[in-house]
Amino acid sequence: MYKYDEYDQRIVDERVSQFRDQTRRYLAGEIAEDDFLPLRLQNGLYIQRFAPMLRIAIPYGLLNTRQVRRLSEISRKYDKGYVHFTTRQNVQLNWPLLEQVPEILADLAEVEMHAVQTSGACIRNTTTDQFAGVARDEIVDPRPWCEIIRQWSTFHPEFAFLPRKFKIAVCGSEEDRAATMVHDIGVHAFRNENGNVRFKILAGGGLGRTPMVASVIRESIEPEHLLTYLDAILRVYNRYGRRDNKYKARIKILVKAMTPEVFTEKVESEWEQIKDSASLLPEAEIERVSQHFIDPEYKGLVDQDFNDLALQAPIGFHSWLKQNVFAHKKPGYCAVTVTLKATGEAPGDVSAEQLDVIADLADQFSLGELRVSHEQNLIFADVEQTALIELWEKLSAVGLATANRGLLTDMICCPGGDFCALANARSIPLAEEIQRKFDDIDFLHDVGELDLNISGCMNACAHHHVGHIGILGVDRKGIEYYQVQVGGSASKGATLGKIIGPSFKREEIPDVLEKILNVYIEQRREDELFIDTCQRIGITPFKERVYAQAA
Amino acid sequence: MPRLLKNNEVFEDDYQILDSESEDLAFTGTLLIPARELDQHEKLLEQKQQPTGLFLDSDDNVESYADILSSFDLITINFPKFIDGRGYSLCRILRDRYHYKGDIRAVGDVLIDQIFMLQRCGFSSYYLREDQKAEDAIKALDTFSLRYQGSSDDPEPLYRKRKVS
Ligand code: HEM
Ligand code: SF4
């Protein structure tokens, strides 16, 4: 993974001093509340319902174990001993004190971490595939490109005050595991007919109040032009994006209003004027950054027979093996997902004790690294298959071996009314009620891969529009209700879900889900996934079942 | 009296933005002429002896004024609110595309914590908002000693300077 040199280190150290000084001036009354707000946001600091919340960047989801241990220490020292992993591969502290934030940032800087641009109307943390570098369907390793984009976007002087936040996601594989179609910019890395790396650039995707799938802005761009092309898109957005209404300020609204064709023309003509500059990305820099992501020294292993493996293991291992273990490009290796979705725990939450165990296990079993996925899970990317049983046993001992990766109960869920001031509804208790209702692992495995996303309000932090089943908290005359949609997907052929009808009370939702699942089970063709059945049969059968009058 | 940060110093510098109706003949400070109303002030431009500058608002289309930029020694770019970041792009276009060499000055809601980035985008002077401390503003010019990207202050990105160990 990328290792800071003295330059990178100096930049984050200077950021800590800058924020320390800003906090001091704020506390001394020299910076007004409104003027401080964007400054603290650009350092990931929100003031939430009960306390500030600090969002720490995990660039494209990669952590080493020193960093994991530091997060655990920080959560004990400055917070309540747990952290929350987010849907954008970041991590949040829910209860830090404003006065201590500069100290937290200094502790983070020591392990090459920061909270730069994790919030605010600027370019946010760039995200990618949690299986980058190890997936079998990978065409181009997205990580060096994410790092190059990270450096370009860090304190970009022209784009610190955009109309609204700006999120970039990079995908380098056949399957899109980074939801690039619903990002402000999606970058698809591929190889042209000569085997050279090229990028397809999409823009204008996003969810929130006006969900939209991104449009292709350019079919192919050479690596040396990647950054200037991004500059051109950002410049057009910075100048012409709406600033009068924050709900219409995202780039998706601009792309739609201009039409993708006109937007593209504007970008191209801007780019023509800036492309021949010192910002051209030299081969040497691509090489330098790529050196940080070359394969570790894998052993010459052979693939294990998973059936044999399962036979040697205690009960429970098999379903975990089937569900949480992902194929690796090297024989004899695999990637393991630790879902943070045990029943009764807020999705994405991990305690400091668990973090310490996870760090030890990553050292022992996965070359000292850990990844975060946008499904709010953690990944050991380089596990030897022969060590799987031992790893599973150790995870089970700390309640981290829930075999539900990709299943109904591995849901994406926002913090909702328990933490968030904007919420209409409490997503976390609902998540728990759903997990309690569907606690039969065999049933869940039978239902198979299913993305369930729960957002507490229109802001769609949990991407409910692209959940195969999406649940949205709405407010009806002061009472919390839940709207249900089906058929969304965050894959390359992204689709937005359709609302099945009037909303429900919270206690009704588990039964509604059961009806939806029953329709699928009855109608599915052999091996057909929930989403495929949905797309084949449409929403009517679901609607009829859910709203049928009791006879 | 407005305070101007320029060449690492803060000093008082009175300015007025001309509007089409009124004209204060006795005013001797810096006159700023809104680009949109330029044609109404042509005569005035010829007569005035005092410093005059072009005034661009954040939503002005700088491309429309490309031809006349060089007749001004000073261009001011307005920040109606500091979170309105359009002025950063306008300034870069003035410097990088039109190679404007005169003074470019930020005016309006200009705060200490934006000065470093303004400078990077090519601003060379700043009318500070009333409540901003002069010494902190001067210090802010040196907030970071390194920058990743090329910009109007220095077009070479870090990746062209990095000494690889
Ligand atoms: C608890 C306090 C939070 C608040 C007040 C909050 C607020 C918001 C708001 C206002 C938006 C909409 C912005 C827009 O569309 O322009 C948004 C979007 C988003 N939030 Fe949050 N959020 C919070 C927590 C979280 C957490 C914990 C996560 C991750 C689990 C998250 C993930 C996201 C994502 C992914 C989006 C983008 C949705 C899109 O593509 O439009 N948020 N948030
Ligand atoms: S979706 Fe709404 S309720 Fe949930 S975290 Fe985002 S803003 Fe808060």
Image (spheres, coloured by chain):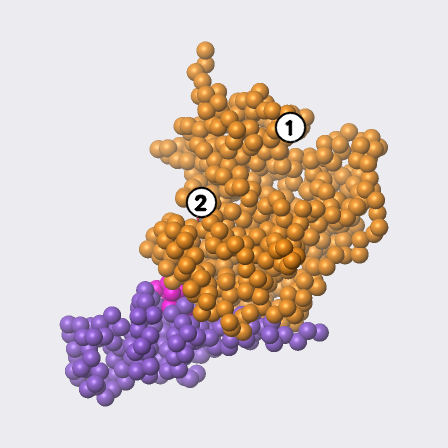
Q: Tag 1, which secondary structure?
A: loop
Three-letter amino acid code of the residue under disc 1: Asp
Q: Dot 1, how many residues are within 10 Å of its Cα: few (below 14), some (14-19), or many (20+)? A: few
The colour applied to the residues of chain A in this rendering is: orange
Residue A401 seen by the camera: yes
What residue does disc 1 label?
A527
Q: Nearer the viewer, residue A35 or B73?
A: B73
Q: Position of residue A299 (x, y in %)?
A: 83, 52
Report in which chain the residue with disc 2 lies: A
| Relative vertical location of residue A304 with respect to residue B21 in this rendering, above or below | above
Viewer-side residue, B90 vs A23: B90
Residue A172 versus residue A157 in the image, above or below: above
Sooner in the amino-acid sequence: mark 2 or mark 1: 2
Q: Which residue is mark 2?
A: A212
Region in magenta: B81-88
Residue at 39% over, 35% down: A475
Residue A52 lies, with reference to residue A413, above or below; the image says below
Please give the count of numbered marks on the rendered protein.
2
The residues tagged by marks 2 and 1 sit, at their Cα atoms, a distance apart of 30 Å
In front: mark 2 or mark 1? 1
Of A400 and A278, which appears nearest the observer? A278
Residue toward you, A326 or A473: A326
Q: Taking the image as drawn, is residue A429 in sight?
A: no
